[in-house]
Amino acid sequence: MYSGDSAVPDDDPDGRCNRRGKPRFPSGCSERSWRLKVRRWQIWQFYDGKAGHENQSRGLIEALARLQPITTLMLLPLPTTKALAGLIYDYLAGWRDLPAPDLLLGAGHHTHLSLLAARRVRGGKALVLMRPSLPLQLFDLCLIPEHDTPPNYPNVLATRGALNRILPSATLKSDRGLLLIGGPSAHFAWNDANVCQQIAAIITADPVTHWTLTTSRRTPSSFLEAFPDVSNPQLTVVPVTQTGPDWLPDQLACTGQVWVTADSMSMVYEALTAGAAVGVLEVPQQCDNRISRELDRLTDDGWVTLFTDWQRDRQLHPLAQTFCEAERCARWIVDRWSVVRWRWRENWFDAATAQ
């Protein structure tokens, strides 16, 4: 909201500011009625159908919505030939009648050409999540996790892990625990029995805590069949098929202890963002890779505790600080790209409502 000491905007065509830079209010109008208005942003989100990419995009969009009025339009990426045609000929009939975008957002390789084609045909700024397959200089902003070793370019912002929808929570309960189970990946193998043994040791060591276990799309069907403690009164099992998009954020908002299998770095960062004490269930590593190196860094810096380290004192240590990367990135974008105007009694949004 405007205060009388704020700087005068450059666009004051009606002479509403006096020589000292303070607004000259119309007759019968108080300073309280004079508002700093923030234009609603139109965001085009390109969605490739992958849940992990959608989670990152939604995390950033929701963080932007907490700072800035927005409207989001979700679009599927164009076929490669059509996107290239848009880039070459500056024309795409299907997008002519859509509201012009301020921000074009995409996560995943299949969205990149569509982002650039949309910017050429309809304008706006192209923002890509994760390291793109195309040259970084083609995009207005690239949000790249630190473990992907982003270069020090003006249009690159390094992030702690992938963005997510989680917010730091002030209502974490120490007697509630969450077990997040991933599965085999390109970087990690899998062993049902070994993971089950680690979980059994954790539950046995803490009889006060009630644990909720959930799986992921990569979890082998054999895991729950091999799990011996399904009937344990300390444990509730919720398969991924019984969870919705808001299930995990709701759980993390009130869970004080979280264990995540080492293959699931995105869930590690979601738990850290919530502010929970985070432990890592160990699974066989295929080879030295960027994910394992990132996990080593988090362990060395005290952010997470490996199961082998936990066995020494049977304690998960609370975080000394928290962070929210989606919020940080959203503030970076708004601070640099906001389109702010001064208007009198026009149908724009009051900045106070965006706080």
Image (cartoon, rainbow, N blue to C red):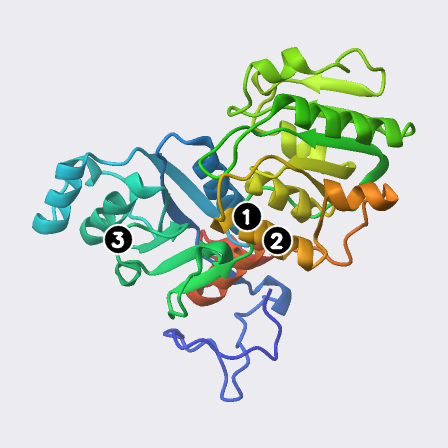
Q: Which label number is shown at residue 43?
A: none
Q: What amino acid type is highlighted by mark number 2?
A: Asp
Q: Which residue is under mark 2?
A: 296
Viewport quadrant of the N terminus = bottom right
Estimate the spatial distance between the alpha carbons at disc 2 and disc 1, rounded to whole Å: 6 Å
* Distance Cα–Cα, label 1 vs label 3: 25 Å
Q: Quadrant of residue 278?
A: top right
> In this orientation, which residue lies closer to the viewer: 130 or 57?
130
Q: Residues within 10 Å of mark 2 (few under 14, many from 20)?
A: some
Is label 2 in contact with label 1 (beta carbons under 8 Å)? yes
Q: Is residue 21 visible?
A: yes
- Between 290 and 169, the residue placed more toward the observer is 290
Badge 2 or badge 3: first in the primary sequence: 3
**Residue visible at 12% across and 38% down in the picture:** 81
Asked if residue 324 shows in the view, the reply is no
Determine which residue is flagged by label 1. 292
- Between 16 and 290, the one nearer to me in the picture: 290
Asked if 153 appears above or below 65 in the picture, the reply is: below
Estimate the spatial distance between the alpha carbons at disc 2 and disc 3, rounded to whole Å: 29 Å
- Marks 3 and 2: in contact by CB < 8 Å? no
Q: For numbered disc 2, what is the local secondary structure?
A: helix
Q: Which residue is mark 3?
A: 134
> In the rendered picture of this protein, how many numbered marks are placed on residues?
3
Q: Position of residue 224 (x, y in %)?
A: 64, 15
Between label 1 and label 3, give the one nearer the viewer. 1
Element under disc 3: loop
| Quadrant where the image shows the C terminus | bottom right
Q: Give the amino acid type for the residue marked by disc 1 in the picture.
A: Ser
- Mark 2 vs mark 3, foreground winner is 2
Amino acid under label 3?
A: Leu
